[in-house]
Amino acid sequence: MLKNISTLCFFALLFWACEAPTEATSDSSETKENPINTEETPAEYAIVIHGGAGTILRSDLTPEQDAAYREALNKALDIGEEILKNGGTSIDAVEQTIHFMEDSPLFNAGKGAVFNHEGHNEMDASLMMGNDRMAGAVGGVSNIKHPISAARAVMEKSPHVLLTGKGAEQFAADQNLEIVDPSYFYTQRRWDALQNALAREKEEGEAQVELDHNERKKGTVGCVALDKEGNIVAGTSTGGMTNKRWNRLGDSPIIGAGTFADNATCGVSCTGHGEFFIRWAVAYDVAARMAYKGIDINTAASEVINEELVKAGGEGGLIALDKMGNITMPFNSEGMYRGYAKPGERVVAIYKE
Ligand code: ASP
């Protein structure tokens, strides 16, 4: 009898010894891949967008302006959602959604881009695939109607990731992308913003850097989508910051700073004071925190935007989604034009609400 019990104990111990390490390994790798509850059913598709973050107070917008922004955000979501719902790819959804926002004078991207110090529009855009980490970007372009399409072309048709200035414009023309006269991007509102910035700069002299930050006109656009195949794509497009000089590039065309995507973690698009987003590698940092700390997308994004950037004094926000379709849209400024759609769910928001 005693012999039987000890034999049983021996086998029980042996079983435990063999099983325990295996369980621990599979647990930790699963945590890395699926930061959120692994039993949750993934959303069939999901799309999240932003139209820039900054000092956007309810008192700043007339009811008409407020309604116009909400309508534009809803239309942008309609475009992307329609593609995803019908089984289209996340890259098409991101490109087409951003096209609409680039065409809208409301946002600081494409038509409606802010002016640089010399009174020109210089635009930046980038795009990244979550399945294979392919990416493309353009910086400082002045005549490409849809900079996001130029970013896609760089990824798909060139051996490079980032092209800038005249070279990027030549490449886009060679790819038969739509080229327009630079005057196409002009809007009175952004021109007036530059004149205000220049006037203040004259008065305040050396305050230029601070002035850029405070006078920065929000409106950079971004989109992250998850398609039915489970692929995540992230894209960002911007005119940069009002009164920028010396061919300044912000975070938007920098992979890892303004844009990042990896199916194993998340896709991210940022908006805010680009110099901080570059130095804090914001988009990548969200994904890295998920991978290395095993935390969920909401916690990871909030740590970066509401803790790290706040400590540093970097204003802005981001949108992100993971492969389960979990969405987060944190910002540390007064407002951020933002919204998302999933089957049966739609949110559009502007202020801290
Ligand atoms: N991040 C952009 C830049 O620094 C500007 C913005 O998002 O408002 O160029």
Image (spheres, rainbow, N blue to C red):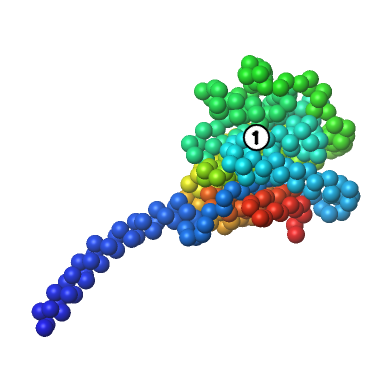
- 353 left or right of 67? left
Residue shown at 66%/55% (left/top)?
Answer: 344
| Residue at the extreme bottom | 1
Quadrant of image for the N terminus: bottom left
| Image position, residue 118 (x, y; %) | 80, 25
Where residue 126 sits, quadrant-wise, is top right
Residue bearing the label numbered 1? 95
| Image position, residue 33 (x, y; %) | 45, 51
Q: Is residue 298 above or below residue 285?
A: below
**Mark 1 CB within 8 Å of ligand 1:** no
Number of numbered labels in the structure image? 1
Looking at the image, which is closer to me, 91 or 128? 91
Task: Classify 10 Å Cα crowding around label 1: few (below 14), some (14-19), many (20 and above).
Answer: many
| Residue at the extreme front | 86
- 83 left or right of 66? left
Q: Is residue 101 above or below residue 348?
A: above
| Image position, residue 222 (x, y; %) | 67, 41
Provide the secondary structure element on which disc 1 rests. helix
| Image position, residue 303 (x, y; %) | 58, 55
Amino acid type, label 1: Glu
Residue shown at 68%/35% (left/top)?
Answer: 96
Residue shown at 12%/78% (left/top)?
Answer: 4
Quadrant of image for the C terminus: bottom right
Q: Is residue 85 above or below residue 2?
A: above
The answer to whether any part of residue 170 appears in the image is yes
The answer to whether any part of residue 246 appears in the image is no
Looking at the image, which is closer to me, 31 or 177? 177
Residue shown at 44%/56% (left/top)?
Answer: 31
Looking at the image, which is closer to me, 274 or 255? 255
